[in-house]
Amino acid sequence: EEPRKAPAEARRENEIKCLTAEIEHLKNFGCLGVSPSLEGLRDENAKLKYRLNFLRKSLQEERSKPVRSMININSCLQEIFGAAIQAAYPDLENPPLVVTPSQQPKFGDYQCNSAMGITQILLKTTEQKVSPREIAEKISKNIPANDCIEKVEIAGPGFINVHLRKDFVSKQLSSLLVNGVQPPALGKRKKVVVDFSSPNIAKEMHVGHLRSTIIGDSMCRLFEFAGYDVLRLNHLGDWGTQFGMLIAHLQDKFPDYLTISPPIGDLQAFYKESKRRFDTEEEFKKRAYQCVVMLQSKNPDFIKAWNLICDVSRKEFQKIYTCLDITLTERGESYYQEMMKDIVQEFEDKGFVQVDDGRKIVFVPGCSVPLTIMKSDGGYTYDTSDLAALRHRLCEEKADIIIYVVDSGQSVHLQTVFAAGQMIGWYDPKVTRVAHAAFGVVLGEDKKKFKTRSGDTVRLIDLLEEGLKRAMDKLKDKERDKVLSEEELRAAQTSVAFGCIKYADLSHNRLNDYVFSFDKMLDDRGNTAAYLLYAFTRIRAIARLASIDEEMLQKAAREEVLILDHEKEWKLGKCLLRFPEIVQKILEDLLLHTLCDYLYELATTFTEFYDNCYCVEKDRQSGQIVKVNMWRLLLCEATAAVMAKGFDILGIKPVQRM
């Protein structure tokens, strides 16, 4: 016996049969010359073929689609309306395709706003004056069979309001509960390299590194969730002339460093001492330059000194990465040193190098500042190092996407490096995506660059420790220490402290500067991590208080139909299914504040639902549970699952009890 087909699949197959027969019929009439208008016949034939191609494609995709991926409803609607527009206007090249969620429920769930754009195109290309409303009607008549649209309505000057089918939304929510929160289907698995954090050896990580580290980690998490192969690179500043003065100072201060590991506890102070000597002692300065030469010639004693200094820094950096739950693969500037000679040679061989006062420079078309790939003394520069890193990521790592999470001040430099990579033929921007995810600076509450009261740069470790202290104070103010165990209290403290620091950064558009304020980020009202973490723990507690365990919820998810009759149930269900749209949008524009805004909207939509729809009904006198509305508990579970995945992408760790 053949397996039963899904209704949507059967509908599509039936329509494909009908369309194929209709095309055959038209073809026969055209051959016999029966039709009074051959042009009209061809036009009708073209329309039917567009619809047929769409149906065949969507049926093929339906069958080949991984069962576990979530459907991006916006993308589905774009495909449907794209096919409708092509069928309605087959001669129109690249017609505008605009589908957005509706802002008001009375206008349906989504809107297609393409008609106005098509009016303008027809006026320019054919001098036809057709009203947007007429175009909207023509598009609506050509919408192919699909499972998601209940009905469409034309409103105003030509908006097409789309109402989704409730059984479609209910089915998608059931799939989410059974399969977990999954990414939308995104095609082939891609190799992604993300360059982020990148502190300098012998200098402490400060608040300036905070944004790169937090934003870069979250981007990696997003690409990993999407199923891509992600390489998280920490491009450390671990090479250069500063190591000459550090090694010279190490030799003076700890002459037995080769046999006894030197106790360099405070590397920042060590750096400052060596820099002061470099600036004031001529003899020391000369020796520092000699040390650089010895290091670059790979003298074993100097390599050991260099490694000692790097290791001290690495241990300090790791304390911060551990706190923030961030993993990285270290590939500092030193990693690319052996490749520098080949980079210079390649640019020379292709005729791109000019000599200017002994320096070798490269002018890149459209860029105002040339790249210096070799200094007059034969040394290499940051330009050479960054070109070597780009080439390695493109040609050796074979990356499809490379993201540099670096502050906005480096925009001109990075754009020049990227343009040079294109000019020499390392990559085609139409095939490989190389992007600078720029970000603004962190400001203090006085709206000036964030510094300590003494005017020093804020050390990142101090900032994290202050966050822990304030989070504990906040929890004790709310008397959580009286209801939580010691272990639960510590877990809540780290969750709130580090979650709030990350969320405060990620919830702002990264392109803008943002004001760092512990008071605002620890506030449990408004769009903050504190509010969302509290909301999450409350949602997770609902099933627990109703004595419904994980196994019962999973059984219900497989068997129960999610009823979405109440307007607040419907609103929450649709909000949950927008998650794949949010993911896809951020993969394109790399703006993570969109996810934060979505999670806040989801939490407030859930609150509306919970206030209006009883999940667990109790006897008013005894407080005994009278009835459990399981489909509503499943909506709670779906909300918690989507929030948990959102937190995971943002690098925030929620706790079960707060």
Image: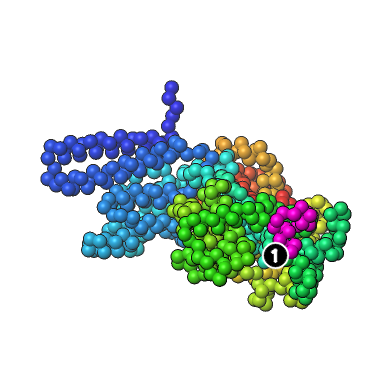
Q: Is residue 304 magenta?
A: yes
Please report the residue visible at 33 percent of the width from the left and 42 percent of the height from the top.
53
Q: Residue at x 54, y 56 (%)?
A: 345
- Quarter of the image where the N terminus is located: top left
In which quadrant will I find the C terminus? bottom right
- The residue labelled by disc 1 is 241
Q: As displayed, is residue 149 above or below residue 608?
A: above
Instruction: State whether residue 526 appears in this view.
Output: no
- Residue at point 39%, 43% (across, down): 146
Give the residue type at disc 1. Thr
Foreground: 583 or 232?
232
Left or right: residue 542 versus residue 59 is: right
Instruction: From the viewer's side, name the closer residue of 178 and 105.
Output: 178
56, above or below 651, in the image: above
Q: Is residue 103 visible?
A: yes
Disc 1 is placed on an element classified as loop
- Magenta segment main secondary structure: helix
Magenta stretch holds residue 202: no
Q: Residues within 10 Å of mark 1 (few under 14, many from 20)?
A: some
* Location of residue 656 with respect to 279 vertically, above or below: above
- Magenta region: 290-307
The structure residue drawn at horizontal position 25% and vertical position 45%, both measured from the top left corner, is 46
Q: Position of 147 compared to 409: left or right?
A: left
- Which quadrant of the structure image shows residue 599? bottom right
Answer with the quarter of the image where residue 304 lies.
bottom right
Q: Between 642 and 351, which is closer to the camera in this rendering?
A: 351
